[in-house]
Amino acid sequence: MSSLNCELGGNGPHVALLHPTGLDLSFLSPVASILRQEFTVLTLDQRGHGESRMSVPMSSLEDYADDLHKLLYEINFAPAAIACSSFGGMVAMVSALKYPQAVSALAICACTATQTAESRAIARKRGDDARHNGMADVLEATLDRWFTAPFRAAGKDKAVRERLLSDDPNGWAAAWYAMGDVHTLPQLSALRANTTNLRRPRSYS
């Protein structure tokens, strides 16, 4: 069986939600609870995040796509639409390109399909900083990127702060290294998954 921690619920067409770097499936719970009124929704902790431990080394986005593919078939969830952002979006693109039969639709946001030399170096540094100095070293810069100053001043970043501080630095670093190497842009025209409509078909019973 897959070693990925996951939750499944709802009824209807299959949708998988992938979280951004450093978070876990719990941060997708509000979205999942809404979608489960119309869809069967899978949320999961990607390897090195949450309860999905780094039992095997991860070095590329393909490794994370392989993880997802294995899980989808183990729980008889393929094909599935995948909705995600950032790191999750990059994993989804690679999954749809490598395993087109398993991905029925894509909804991706806040996600790049390639890196410049500068952005690749930034991604790797974020991984290195945590691996060498711990998650506290990357905490404030990450929260500043993700949230506005008023949001943080109101203490609304508490849950994310606690999650990041409890992360495995090696899991964080592996994800950033993989993101630094993303280069799916030349292949995007080959995508065959529906990227426009995740609505339940009218005839669905």
Image: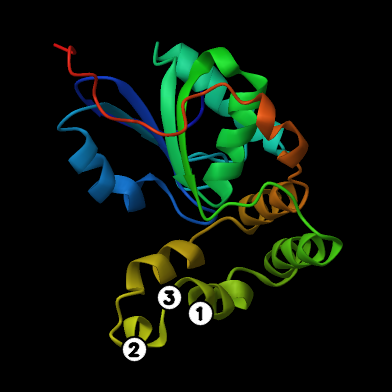
| Identity, as a three-letter code, of the amino acid under mark 3 | Phe
Amino acid, disc 2: Ala
Q: In which quarter of the image is the C terminus?
A: top left
Q: Position of residue 201 (x, y in %)?
A: 24, 19
Q: In the image, is 160 to the left or to the right of 65?
A: left
Residue 133 in sight: yes
The residue that mark 1 highlights is 144
Residue drawn at (49%, 75%) of the image: 143
Q: State whether residue 153 is above or below residue 168.
A: below
**Reading the chain from its start, which is encountered first: label 2 or label 3?**
3
- Residue projecting furthest to the right: 117
User: How many angstroms separate mark 2 from mark 1 (CA)?
Assistant: 11 Å
Where 85 sits versus 5, above or below? below
State the separation of the CA atoms marked 2 and 3: 10 Å
Q: Let me know if residue 59 appears in the view.
A: no
Q: Name the residue under label 2.
A: 153
Question: What amino acid type is highlighted by mark number 1?
Answer: Asp
Q: Which numbered disc, 2 or 1, marks the residue that appears first in the sequence?
A: 1
Whether tag 2 and tag 1 are in contact, CB under 8 A, the answer is: no
Indicate the secondary structure of the residue bearing disc 1.
helix
CA separation in Å, label 1 and label 3: 6 Å
Report the residue at 48% width, 61% height from top.
166
Horizontal arrangement in the rendering, residue 60 relative to residue 139 (left or right): right
Q: Which mark is residue 147?
A: 3
